[in-house]
């Protein structure tokens, strides 16, 4: 088996590359700059090289596109432009590559759950209507419109939740206050956190590649979302730390600006497509996921 991954050097991409390489899959990492690989089953190719010749990815069963500017920054107008443009640009490049391949691959492209809008009371599945009530929702709407134009054998738009892992993403920052005994809810604590363990999102990506019934939008979230307050209490319990110090919403707004909405408002997003398609989560509950991550911190 052969897969091509764009954005393969990031947090999720790094885990995905190791997952495939350990299983004997040939991995072609698409990057901006040339580099040598230290793994036998992993090769690099640049976007500019693929503009001239697509032979490096010819025969790939799937192209997995995880490329895009990080949203974890203050959202200045320049940052907003980079966040949107990086996503549209990578999809357009993938479309150009796929259009020149003799054998069309499956496309699994990262997307976002923001497209459902924000709510403390509603639940959202892949069938829920889009609600463009904030910047990221608008980004996802334009992003997915571009994804649908890619000439692929089958297309999956992976609406990614908050990915929990020890070596990247939001989790190391989320647990840091608890390390120092200063953990507590953020804002009201009622906002929903739709999360997924990093091992499960890697398995879900592979499932979307191999299972023909997986197509269209797929929510990459665990089946049991939790409120911010419930997450904090579970983390305090697992780490054996107090849960005493709430952080006022105003403080988060002063620190993060508009991006604070990611921490102060949420969505209860359910993985209906994954469950209906037969996928089974290794870590369906937050306590199971957190215990797994904390065992890894101790080398277990």
Image (cartoon, helix red, strand yellow):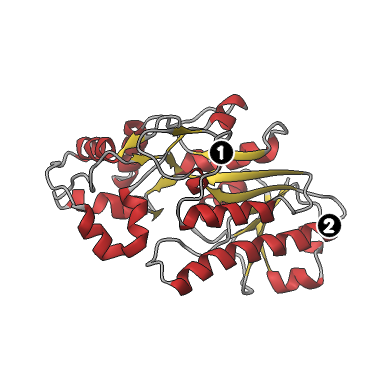
Residue 295 in the image, given as x and y percentages of width and height: 31, 40
| Residue at (57, 50) in percent of width and height | 111
Classify residue 28 as left or right of residue 66: right
Q: Quadrant of the N terminus?
A: top right
Name the residue furthest right: 102
Q: Residues within 10 Å of mark 1 (few under 14, many from 20)?
A: few
Residue positioned 55% across, 43% down in the render: 130
Residue sitting at x 16%, y 47%: 246
In this view, 55 is above or below 170: below
Of residues 27 and 220, the one nearer the viewer is 220
Q: Which residue is mark 1?
A: 129
Whether 156 is drawn above or below 68: the answer is above
Mark 2 burial class by Cα count in 10 Å: few <14, some 14-19, many 20+: some
* Residue drawn at the location 59% of the way across and 25% of the way down: 276
Tag 2 secondary structure? loop
Question: Residue 119: in sight, yes or no?
Answer: yes
130 lies left or right of 164 = right
Q: Mark 2 sits on what residue? A: 101
């Amino acid at each position: 088996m052969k897969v091509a991954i764009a954005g393969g050097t990031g947090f999720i991409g790094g885990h995905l590359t190791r997952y495939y390489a350990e299983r004997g899959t040939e991995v072609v990492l698409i990057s901006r700059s040339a580099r040598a690989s230290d793994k036998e089953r992993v090769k690099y190719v640049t976007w500019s090289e693929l503009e001239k010749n697509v032979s490096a990815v010819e025969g790939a069963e799937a192209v997995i596109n995880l490329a895009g500017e990080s949203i974890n920054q203050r959202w200045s107008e320049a940052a907003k432009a980079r966040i949107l443009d990086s996503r549209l640009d990578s999809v357009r490049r993938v479309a150009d590559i796929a259009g020149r391949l003799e054998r069309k691959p499956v496309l699994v492209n990262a997307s976002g759950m923001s497209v459902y809008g924000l709510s403390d009371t509603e639940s959202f599945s892949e069938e829920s209507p889009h609600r463009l009530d904030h910047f990221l929702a608008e980004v996802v709407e334009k992003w997915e419109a571009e994804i649908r134009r890619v000439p692929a054998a089958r297309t999956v738009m992976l609406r990614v939740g908050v990915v929990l892992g020890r070596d990247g993403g939001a989790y190391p920052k989320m647990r840091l206050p608890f390390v120092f005994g200063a953990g507590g809810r953020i804002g009201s604590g009622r906002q929903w956190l739709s999360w997924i363990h990093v091992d499960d999102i890697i398995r879900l990506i592979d499932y979307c590649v191999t299972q023909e019934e997986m197509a269209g939008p797929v929510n990459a979230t665990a089946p049991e979302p939790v409120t911010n307050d419930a997450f904090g209490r579970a983390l305090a319990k697992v780490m054996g730390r107090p849960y005493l110090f709430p952080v006022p919403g105003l403080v988060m707004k002063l620190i993060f600006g508009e991006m604070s909405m990611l921490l102060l408002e949420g969505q209860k997003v359910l993985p209906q497509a994954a469950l209906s398609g037969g996928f089974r989560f290794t870590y369906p509950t937050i306590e199971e996921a957190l215990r797994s991550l904390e065992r890894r911190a101790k080398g277990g």
